[in-house]
Image (spheres, coloured by chain):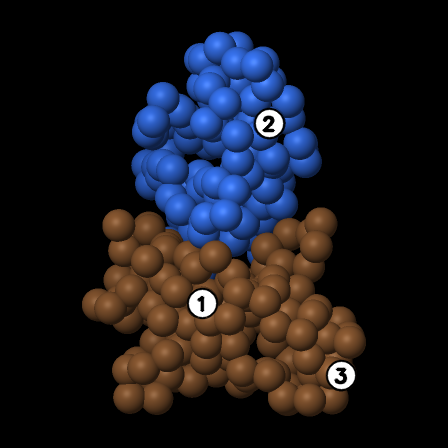
Amino acid sequence: GPKVLQIPSHQIIDMGQMVTLNCDPVSNHLYFYWYKQILGQQMEFLVNFYNGKVMEKSKLFKDQFSVERPDGSYFTLKIQPTALEDSAVYFCASSLGRTTNTEVFFGKGTRLTVV
Amino acid sequence: GDSVTQTEGQVTVSESKSLIINCTYSTTSIAYPNLFWYVRYPGEGLQLLLKVITAGQKGSSRGFEATYNKETTSFHLQKASVQESDSAVYYCALGDPDSGTYQRFGTGTKLQVVP
């Protein structure tokens, strides 16, 4: 079936540095999402993106976070600067339509460790 | 706002026995939400198991069933006879058809099927 690919699967970064998480969504999908899951906790919505713009973001989407998808390439989540509490698994997802009744396809996640 | 509650973090069931994983939801929307079950097998990304978008209806897939009960605001996942290959983490999710632009997830229930 359709796949969402996330690169890399694991990244370790020094606190204060910048990190970019890459996501290759399903090719014909129009809506893109990032979720964050801290170990042992709930997977929580960060942000979604459609037609080149952020549609909605949660309070977890701090000012240090940004997303973009330049020219239909990777959908990226950038954190600059990183903080220790940013350590989590970040899941990228995409869907063809709005998610309220449409299947969402998820990647396997990128485990970010901030040291 | 909308939320999803899964009370069991982990469930252990013997092979060929029946399973029920609990899910309840709450919503501030006037419209009934769309409800989903997703599953994450070891080493894989989250994938849709079943969905129901009409209150009172039942969804089914791969031997699993869930009935959308608007009276009790529940969407429990059931299977009559589990197999070891069903061992995975199961997530209940909700989509608000009125105003939501993303799906909200429960905390997940890890199912371990033992011989």
- Residue named by callout 1: A6
The picture places residue A81, in percent across and down from the top left corner, at 68, 89
- The answer to which of A53 and B87 lies nearer the viewer is B87
Horizontally, is A17 left or right of A109 in the view? right
Tag 2 subunit: B
Marks 2 and 1, how far apart in space?
A: 27 Å
Discs 1, 3: same chain: yes
Name the colour assigned to chain A in the rendering.
brown
- The answer to which of B17 and A34 lies nearer the viewer is B17
- Residue A15: mark: 3
In the rendered image, what is the letter of the chain coloured blue?
A: B
- Residue named by callout 2: B112
Q: Dot 3 lies on which element? A: loop
Which residue is located at x 42 percent, y 72 percent? A23
Amino acid on which the number 2 mark rests in the picture = Gln
Q: Dot 2 lies on which element? A: strand
Marks 2 and 3, how far apart in space?
A: 36 Å
The picture places residue B4, in percent across and down from the top left corner, at 57, 44
- Disc 2 and disc 1 in contact, CB within 8 angstroms: no
Q: Dot 1 lies on which element? A: strand
